[in-house]
Image (cartoon, grey):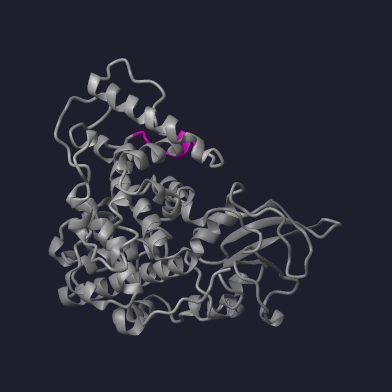
Amino acid sequence: MYPSTSIPENDLFPGAAVYRKLIADDEAAENSGRYFPYTERHLLALWFDDRLRPAELKTSRGEPVTVVNPGRWNLEAGPDFSGAVLLIGREQRRVAGDAEIHIFPSDWKNHGHHIDPRYSNVHFHITWFPGSTDKSLFPSGTIHISCCDRCTADLESIDLSAYPHAEPRANAEFPMLGKNPDEIFQILENAGQERLRQKTLHMAWLIQRCGEAQAVYEETAAALGYKYNKAPFRKLAQKLPLEALAQYRDDWESIYAVLLGLSGLLPRQPGIRWPEASRKELRTLWDCWWREQHKWEEILPLDKKEWRLAGVRPLNHPVRRLAALAQWIAADIFQTVKTNCVDVQTFLRSSENCFWSTHTGWSGKKKRAELLGKGRAQAIFLNVMVPYRLAKGDAEVLKNLPAEPMNSIIRETAYTLFGPDHSPTLYRTALARQGLIQIFNDFILTGEPLPF
C-alpha cells in the first residue's frame, strides 16, 4: 500500500540522524523497506476515534473484530490504551486488556516492550502494516490486528492537536535554560533537518503516488489552509486534479468559480449590507459556475461545515486563498515545476489584481489588500517547494532557506525550552525554527520527556 521511498538522506540531512539518536536508541520506524508517511500518533487517533477506526477489522488469524471500547488513552508511560474491550471471532469472545499501537509489527521488540513489565497486560497489538511476529516476545494470548487493508479514513485530515495530550514531562523546568548557545543552536538545527527529512520523504511518497505536478499542487493547497483548513483544501485539490482543470488553460476566473462551486463556499445570495462591487463579483462567479456546473455533476461538493471559518481573519479566509490557488493553476506553476525554478517571488507575482486584491471581505469596504502575504509565500516555499526539490536531490535549495514566520507553536516550544526571558536569536535561522516545530511534535504534543 505504501511503497519504499529512497532519497540520499545521509548526504542531505547529516544532522537528522544525530537528533534521532538523541531522542531514541533505535530508528525502527523505516527499516522495513516500506515508507509510512504519517506518525504513530495518527494511528492512536485512528484507533481512538469511532469515526476514523476501520470497520470490519480482522485479527492476524482472520477472525472478525468488534471494538466495544478502544480503551482509555494513556498519557503516561506504558501501553497506549488501557482497559480496551473487543469481541473476537464469530462467537464474539469478549477479551479485555491493554492495547499497544505501532506502525510495524517489529516495533514491539524495537521499542523494548518485550522486556518491560508495564506491557505485561497487553492483549491487543494493533499495527498499520501486517507481518510475522515472534509470539514468544508478547504476553500470552496477544491478539494481533493490522489496519492498512481496512482503513478508509484520510489520515492526512486528522488534526493531531484535537486528541489528548499531556504536559511535557521535562527533566527540569526550562531544560535548555543556561545551556551553551552553540549547543542549543546545533540541537535545533539537527531537529530542523529531521523535520525537513520527514517532509522530503512524504513529498517523495506523494510523487510516487500521484506524480510531481499533482503532489506539489495538493501540498500547496494544504499549505494555503493553515492549520484548521488544511484537510478541506487538500480534499478539494484531490477532487479537482490538475488534469481535470487543464481544460481552462489560462482562464483563472473559470478555475476559481469551479473551485468555489465545489468547495461549498460560494454564497447563494449576497448579504444585505454587501456593496455593489461584491454583488457584481458574486453574480459573475455564479454566471460562470452555472455555465460549467454540468461538467462536474459526478463530483460531490464539500460541505461548508467541513471548513473552519469562525475566528479566521478576513485576509486568511479560504475564499481569498482559493483565488490565489486558481491563479497559480492557470499560470501553469504546478505543471512546469520540473523545469522552472519556483521560488517565493513566483507565488507573489502570480497573485494578479482581482476583486480580492482590493477588498478584505464580501461586506468590507474597498481597500487594498494583498492576495497573499510574503510570510505565507515563504511558508509555502519552505514546506512545499523545498521538500520537492530535496526529493529530486537538489541540495542547493538548503543554502538560502527562508525562515518560517513566527507562530504559536514556535513561541510555545521556545518558552518550554528556554523560559520567558530568552533571546530569539537562539532560533533565528530557518532550520532552527523548523527544529522547534519538530520538538513540539515529538515531545510537547505527546507529553514525552524532554531529553535535552
Q: Residue at x 70, y 82 (%)?
A: 136
Horizontal and vertical percent position of residue 79:
58, 65
Q: Residue furthest top?
A: 272
- Is residue 353 within the magenta segment? no
Q: Quadrant of residue 409?
A: bottom left
Q: Quadrant of residue 113?
A: bottom right
Q: Which residues, given as a range, are shown in magenta?
A: 303-310
Q: Quadrant of the N terminus?
A: bottom right
Relative to 176, is 363 above or below? above
Q: Residue at x 38, y 75 (%)?
A: 23
Horizontal and vertical percent position of residue 258:
41, 39
Left/right of residue 58 with respect to residue 362 in the rendered view: right
Horizontal and vertical percent position of residue 99:
63, 63
- Is residue 309 within the magenta segment? yes
Q: Nearer the viewer, residue 106 or 417?
A: 106
Left/right of residue 446 with respect to residue 68 in the rendered view: left
Relative to 84, is 109 above or below? below
Horizontal and vertical percent position of residue 261:
43, 35
Q: Residue at x 20, y 77 (%)?
A: 183
Q: Nearer the viewer, residue 200 or 337?
A: 337
Q: Visible in this render: residue 76? A: no
Q: Residue furthest bottom?
A: 11
Q: Nearer the viewer, residue 57 or 447?
A: 57
Left/right of residue 382 with respect to residue 365 in the rendered view: right
Q: Main secondary structure of the magenta part?
A: loop
Q: Quadrant of the C terminus?
A: bottom left
Q: Quadrant of residue 6?
A: bottom left
